[in-house]
Image (cartoon, rainbow, N blue to C red):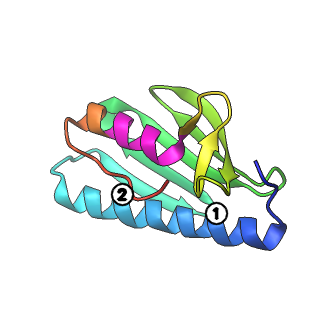
Amino acid sequence: MTELDDARYHNLSSQTMDRLTEYFEDLGDELEMDDYDIEYSSGVLTLRLGAHGTYVINKQPPNRQIWLSSPISGPERYDYDVARNAWFCRHKDESLGVLLSREISEALAIDAAVPIN
């Protein structure tokens, strides 16, 4: 994977976090779940899905990564893959968007299409 400089990392990671926040806020408005909650502050997005658990997605500037803590698949680190134009997990060869779409779809019994790569 190609190394990002600091400015490009901050731009890409901020865009990603903004898209995730907007998507999950809109999803929360559509769902009728009392215990659904989303919070974004200081580079950390927390998505609470009640009995389905809590996701924490955060920027990690020193490593130029995005980290995910999932109640289903556990913790993972994502590096930006310039060739794929996506945040990818080296260990699973899967993008952050694909993993989140699959897990949210299964947890909430909906067809989630998280709008990031």
Residue at position x 46%, y 57% in the image: 116
| Discs 2/1, front | 1
Residue 24 lies, in percent from the top left, at: 36, 57
Q: Is residue 56 magenta?
A: no
Main secondary structure found in the magenta portion: helix
Specify whether residue 82 is in view: yes
Magenta stretch bounds: 95-104
Is 98 contained in the magenta span? yes
Relative image position of residue 71 (x, y in whole percent):
46, 29
The kind of residue on which mark 2 rests is Phe
Q: Is residue 19 left or right of residue 11?
A: left
Which residue in the protein does label 1 denote? Answer: 13
- In the image, taking residue 62 as reference, residue 73 lies left or right, namely left
x, y percent for residue 77: 67, 39
Residue matched to label 2: 24
Above or below 107: residue 80: below
The local crowd at label 2, few if under 14, some if 14 to 19, many if 20 or more residues have their Cα within 10 Å, is some
Count the marks. Answer: 2
Which residue lies at the image location 30% right of the left edge and 48% below the top edge?
36
Q: In terms of depth relative to the viewer, which is nearer, 42 or 75?
A: 75
Question: Is residue 42 at least partly visible in the picture?
Answer: no
Indicate the secondary structure of the residue bearing disc 1.
helix
